[in-house]
């Protein structure tokens, strides 16, 4: 139990060892640790940015989708309106055509009825004249009595 | 330790043999710088190489990529020491953190040498012709004072460097008693010096002796446990009482080893923390 040269040797070894650790060990390990810390921070930041980008892209796609849906809706509505218009148009033109045909037919009928009535009237008049001339046994001058026949035909 | 009961040393002989260093010559007096403790120097350098080599390999292989277990362990130790330094020391210094790491690891290795079975290395040394061997460097006063005096020298150096010689001395002269009155202050100065200088000078002594005392005591307990079966030798294997002693010694040895491992860690930690605190005080202005 005494103090001897070991003390001096121990101090020298200690100083050398600390110098060695200071020069060759400590900075390298700490640099690796710091570098990794930096990398992890970068990675986390990148991940966060990626998530933000994803959220933005989702929002954008949502907007696009919504717009497309609206467009489709509009188009369908337009088509329906147009179809309704066309049906309406067809219906109205058909009814107008029907009306026209009906009117024409009625006019035709009236015309023919008038003609028939006319010819019937003339026939009746002729018959009346024939009957009358047979009754009178004499020829009635048709031309001379045309005026009378016409008046008669108009009365019938 | 010894083959038969007949050749067994007395307990005193055993313990004295155990605490004798392997030296170049017998020391004359308490201080004798012609003497070298070969065993302490050998184990101190061996453990320095072990620590330095282990960490050097780790530092060489250190990458910023995914760390393996080896690198993870070394980084864990380094970061732990770094956080201890940052907690206690506000300034910047390239020296203090590596110094703290070296002290912690080296002293821990010194102390853990205590857990090697107490007679294993001395008996192996005897086989190669060496009469004595002490394998726990921190039970050598030269080793612990070598550490604490180096730390003390650094404290002096940093104190003078950071505060100037006047500021450094002034801290002893003007604390703890101070006054605005110049006359009163002049009276306080000697009192302050008498109080502060011894407490400052006691630091390296207490730093060294705290470590030394704890580990030396731990080693002594192992030596005393070894005395349980010392006088019986292999004859103990022949009797139930002998077996009882063997079992008791083994059980106590295990319990004490666990406790001693804790002491080893604790003392290495205390030595490191006190070094950091002393150096940070030397660097800080009050």
Image (tube, coloured by chain):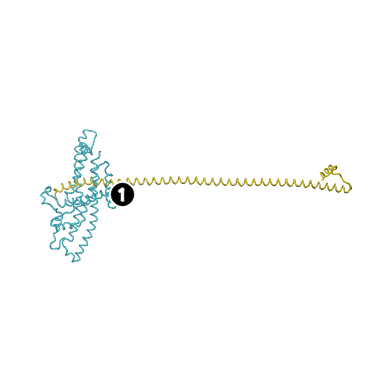
With A142 as the anchor, is A54 left or right in this view?
A: left
> Residue beneath label 1, please?
B65
Looking at the image, residue A113 lies above or below residue B164: below
Q: Chain of mark 1?
A: B
Q: How many marks?
A: 1
Front one among B206 and A126 = A126
Looking at the image, residue B8 lies above or below residue B277: below
What crowding class fits label 1: few (fewer than 14 Cα within 10 Å), some (14-19), or many (20 or more)?
few
From this viewpoint, is residue B65 visible? yes
Quadrant into which the N terminus of chain B falls:
bottom left
* Picture quadrant where residue A150 is located: top right
Front one among B155 and B202 = B155
Quadrant into which the C terminus of chain B falls:
top left
Where is residue B218 shown, x and y percent of the image?
20, 54
Where is residue B56 shown, x and y percent of the image?
23, 49
Front one among A110 and A38 = A110
Residue farthest toward the top in the current orientation of the protein = B182
Where is residue B263 shown, x and y percent of the image?
23, 52
């Amino acid at each position: 139990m005494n103090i001897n040269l070991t003390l001096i040797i121990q101090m020298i070894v200690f100083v050398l060892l600390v110098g060695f650790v200071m020069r060759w060990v400590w900075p390298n390990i700490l640099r690796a640790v710091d570098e990794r810390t930096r990398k992890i921070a970068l990675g986390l930041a990148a991940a966060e940015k990626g998530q933000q980008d994803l959220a933005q892209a989702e929002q954008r796609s949502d907007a696009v989708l919504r717009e497309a849906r609206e467009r489709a809706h509009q188009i369908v509505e337009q088509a329906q309106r147009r179809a309704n218009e066309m049906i309406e148009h067809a219906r109205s033109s058909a009814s107008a055509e029907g009306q026209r045909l009906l009117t024409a037919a009625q006019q035709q009928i009236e015309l023919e009825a008038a003609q028939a009535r006319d010819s019937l009237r003339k026939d009746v008049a002729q018959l009346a004249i024939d009957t009358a001339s047979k009754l009178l046994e004499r020829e009635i001058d048709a031309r001379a009595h045309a005026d009378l026949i016409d008046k008669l035909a108009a009365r019938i | 330790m010894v083959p038969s009961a007949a050749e067994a040393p007395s307990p005193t002989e055993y313990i004295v043999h155990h605490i004798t260093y392997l030296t170049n010559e017998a020391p004359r007096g308490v201080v004798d710088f012609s003497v070298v403790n070969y065993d302490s120097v050998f184990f101190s350098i061996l453990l320095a190489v072990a620590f330095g080599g282990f960490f050097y390999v780790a530092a060489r292989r250190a990458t910023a990529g995914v760390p393996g277990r080896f690198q993870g362990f070394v980084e864990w130790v380094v970061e732990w020491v770094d956080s201890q330094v940052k907690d206690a020391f506000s300034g910047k210094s390239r020296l203090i953190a590596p110094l703290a790491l070296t002290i912690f690891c080296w002293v821990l290795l010194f102390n853990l040498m205590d857990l090697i079975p107490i007679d294993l290395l001395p008996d192996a040394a005897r086989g190669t012709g060496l009469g004595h061997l002490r394998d726990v460097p921190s039970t050598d006063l030269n080793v612990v004072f070598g550490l604490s005096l180096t730390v003390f020298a650094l404290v002096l150096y940093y104190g003078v460097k950071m505060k100037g010689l006047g500021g450094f001395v002034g801290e002893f002269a003007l604390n703890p008693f101070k006054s605005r009155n110049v006359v009163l202050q002049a009276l306080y100065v000697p009192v302050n010096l008498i109080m502060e200088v011894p407490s400052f000078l006691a630091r390296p002594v207490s730093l060294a002796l705290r470590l030394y005392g704890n580990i030396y005591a731990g080693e002594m307990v192992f030596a005393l446990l070894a005395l349980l079966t010392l006088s019986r030798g292999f004859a103990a294997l022949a009797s139930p009482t002998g077996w009882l002693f063997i079992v008791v010694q083994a059980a106590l040895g295990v319990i004490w080893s666990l406790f001693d491992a804790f002491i080893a860690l604790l003392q290495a930690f205390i030595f490191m923390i006190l070094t950091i605190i002393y150096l940070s005080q030397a660097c800080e202005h009050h």
